[in-house]
Amino acid sequence: MAEVTLKVNGEERQVTADPGDFLLYVLRNELELNGPKFGCGLTQCGACTVLVEGNPARACMTPISAVEGKEILTLEGLGTIDEPDPLQQAFIDEQAAQCGYCLNGIIMTAKALLDQNPNPADEDIRAALAGNLCRCGTHTRIIRAIRRAAEGKVTA
Amino acid sequence: MTGTRLSRRNLVRGAGALIVSFRLAGSAKPAAAQSIWADPNVQIESNPELDSWIRIAEDNHVTLFTGKVELGTGILTALSQIVADELYVDFDQLTIVSGDTDIVPDQGGTTATATIGVAAVATRAAAATARQTLLDLGAGSLGADSSDLEIAGGVIQVKGDASRKVTYGELVGGTLFERAVDASAPLKDPGEYTIVGQSIPRIDIPEKVTAASGDYMENARVPGMLFARTLRAPSYGATLTSYDETVADQPGIVAVLPFRSPGDERLARVEALNVMPGDFIAVVAEEENQAIRAIARLQETAVWEPGEGLPTTDAGLYDWMLENAQPIDNLTEDFQEPLETRLAQYEANREAATSIVEATYRGPYLCYGAISSAWSLADVSEDSARIWTASQGPFTAREMVAQALGFASPDQVQVFGGSSSGLYGRRDATDQEVDVEAAIISQAVGAPVRLQWTREQDFVWAQSRPPQIVKLEAVLDDANSINGVRAQIYTATRGTYAPLCAKGMEESPYLLGPTPIEGHDAGPLLRTGYMRNVFSGYNVFSMESFMDELAAATGTDPAQFRLDHLDDQRAIDVINAATERAGWEPHQGPSGRGMGLSFALYIRTNLDGPTVTYMCYVAEVDVARDTGEVRVRKLTCAIDPGLVINPDGVKNQVEGGAIQATSWALREKVTFDNQIITSRDWVTYPILTFPETPEVDVVVITRPDQPAKGIGEPVTVPVSSAIANAIFDATGARVRETPFTPERVLAAMEEAPLVATPVS
């Protein structure tokens, strides 16, 4: 166990951890962040997704040694319930949730997509989310929400 | 945007300090537990005090308490709409509190599409009782006759005199109603609804997309919480022989706990609950990463004595079911005529038939596939326990945990339920094993423990939806009308599941003549549970595929053939609405357009206040002729659930149910070898992904003159048959077994199309 400095949502956070520890449990259990979710622990469902240097990463099997010193962004780093990020607001506007448990990973993946491709076609959105599983079947609303965010048509 | 949030902070803000465990200990009648979810009157009788349901604060804020939990279907929003309307308060004036067994009324599990159709009836009765009480109090306070009063926003005023008014809060704020819920309290006229029927945004979405603190039960944490993982056997029935006990010396490991049967008293108590499938080792650690590492080491070193395993593999499942099937004796006791009468009528018609058509349909075991694998947080002391969980039945979990811990009363256990990942039946009924495990582990180490099941455990050790074989035979007369259908249903499950799987066949509203229905159960193979629409799904897949085959056999348009056998106007209306919206063109035989239709009337039988929801889907598919790959382009649905509480909520549920059921139809099947389930992750049990998702178009039909009924299960029911019928329309090939894999579709294209068998 060692002292490790993680840069999470623009802040430097000290944690005590083993270099091989998976990032998800450090974020959830030590830093008490609720955005990244445990889904499968196998990098297959996407519920745990965070952005590392702007790219989607599956926190459930990412060792913290691989992210030390890098910018980690979680869902909390986008916006708050009182001041949601436009992408989060687009999901509210479209009512794009059923259980919503997958949405952390979907919103973070969409954030990376829109940062790299501000005007994606529906096919681009579908392809970007190919590795994110949604069991409730909210796919069509999610696609609409991301398109709405891209078009800037969110509630102010 | 509405901002009502389900957090402790708002709970306190909403109703003041009075909310301290009002639900009287022991006030729920244990005898009611079996039927409480199905009967609003039992819910009221079990929770008679109005104060258990509704509280009003001095600031005129209303707090509503419900035993139901939010699984993503929007029920907390819908219940809030119903009560706000019934109470004549603004939607934002109301906060709903859910899932804490110490403070909410037991309304049974959140299950079986019974929130809007059943629980809301009890909840609305409480609201109506509260309004009547407040109106009477207001009349006294204002010195006016109650018939001269009107209410808006929780303010009672003398009609035409704005100076004479009093608020609910001024009348009862901060005090108790101290009266019983009146199940027959006068209800608001549905014609006066102003909140019911509106697409009010879901109250829980803002916090879920921003990870606000109250968003999911999964975020529950308590000081000093330890983390547990378990290792389970490599085959069913295997017993633990040995393991590397030095794992206990790894950093951060608090305990390594083998649970072995027989001989372990804790395990014996738990096995008596029929929830715990065999031996396991629990590791408890200070950090979750430490527990994961320890389990990896144990997995390498544990030695197991093989168990009995399974009598067949998934490849032999249907043969095994037919070989081992036993008739279900009590199947038809609720039917209007005895089976013998129906069979005799059917046989007489068969003798006189112009033609006879038969077909057999099959559907495999399915996995719930909740994205959040099961977990539970237990804090057990000597004589009490607190459990934070994503259960559909917090009150059932409470009883089972109390039994497992050897407690005298369930009142020694407090269960916190609430918003969670969608569960689809995964944590329904007695399926509270993860809470029981967390509790006995916490009891063993004397500290709060959060137990996380792995994805693999959630596939391999949880229940599956039971498989079914449905053999159908129809008698057609010379007018191409159905004059009898005989159904023989085979399943592999246990207890009450099997007859209910067969009874689902009784729901058809078609005019079919005599319908003898025979059920057979081969007994349990895998553990089975109540997955979404378990009793209707495969029956409707079979019957609606069969209707399509009969339409083709008689040279009739599939939509017209159904209409020819219906006299129920609501059924006729949904079929016409769906076909019109989808651009259906009448045709005989495969049109090549790849459009298929399916109808369903969903009824939960044998309940007080049955759910009656009408649906018709039109599926549009492309079939790759060289590979057999099926792509569902679009699903159009018309749905009539009676009075619609929240139209966008209904649309959301239809879209989701359509897509989930498309995944079942195209992709899903639990596989197993002679030892254990081999579907163990999202690679070996693939589900539909974003690139494959169909467009979904929904027509919502509201009927204010009909009771509001649920839709969560129904919306998934007629999807696989609509897709099968669309595959037939595209190719002339009939697939009679789900999932519709490329191999199966290619094989069907090789077969001769079904032709009515002439009577010899």
Image: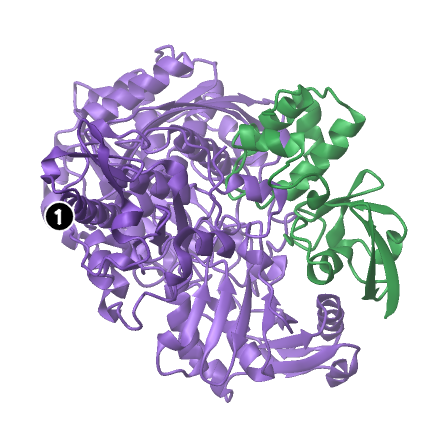
Chain colours: A green, B purple
Q: Is residue B180 left or right of B88 when viewed as pictured?
A: left
Q: Examine the image and state in which quarter residue B687 appears.
A: top right
Q: Examine the image and state in which quarter residue B44 appears.
A: bottom left
Which of these two is toward me, B679 or B485?
A: B679
* Label 1: how many Cα within 10 Å (few below 14, some 14–19, many 20+): few
What x and y, as percent, mark residue B329? Answer: 21, 59
Q: Mark 1 falls within which chain?
A: B
Q: Is residue B687 left or right of B297 when viewed as pictured?
A: left
At 27% from the left and 58% from the top, the residue drawn is B51
What x and y, as percent, mark residue B394? Answer: 41, 62
Q: Quadrant of the C terminus of chain B?
A: top left
Q: Look at the picture and state if B342 lies above or below B7.
A: above
Question: Which residue is situated farthest in the right direction here?
Answer: A69
What x and y, as percent, mark residue A136? Answer: 51, 41
Amino acid type at circle 1 is Ser
Q: Look at the picture and state if B562 lies above or below B95.
A: above
Question: Which residue is situated farthest in the front direction here?
Answer: B163
* Residue of label 1: B184
Q: Is residue B441 left or right of B726 when viewed as pictured?
A: right
Quick one: SS at disc 1?
A: loop
Which of these two is toward me, B118 or B477?
A: B118
- On the question of residue B91 being in view, the answer is yes
Q: Examine the image and state in which quarter residue B302 appears.
A: bottom right
Which of these two is toward me, B209 or B490?
A: B209
- On the question of residue B746 being in view, the answer is no
Which of these two is toward me, B656 or B188?
A: B188
What x and y, as percent, mark residue A61? Answer: 77, 54
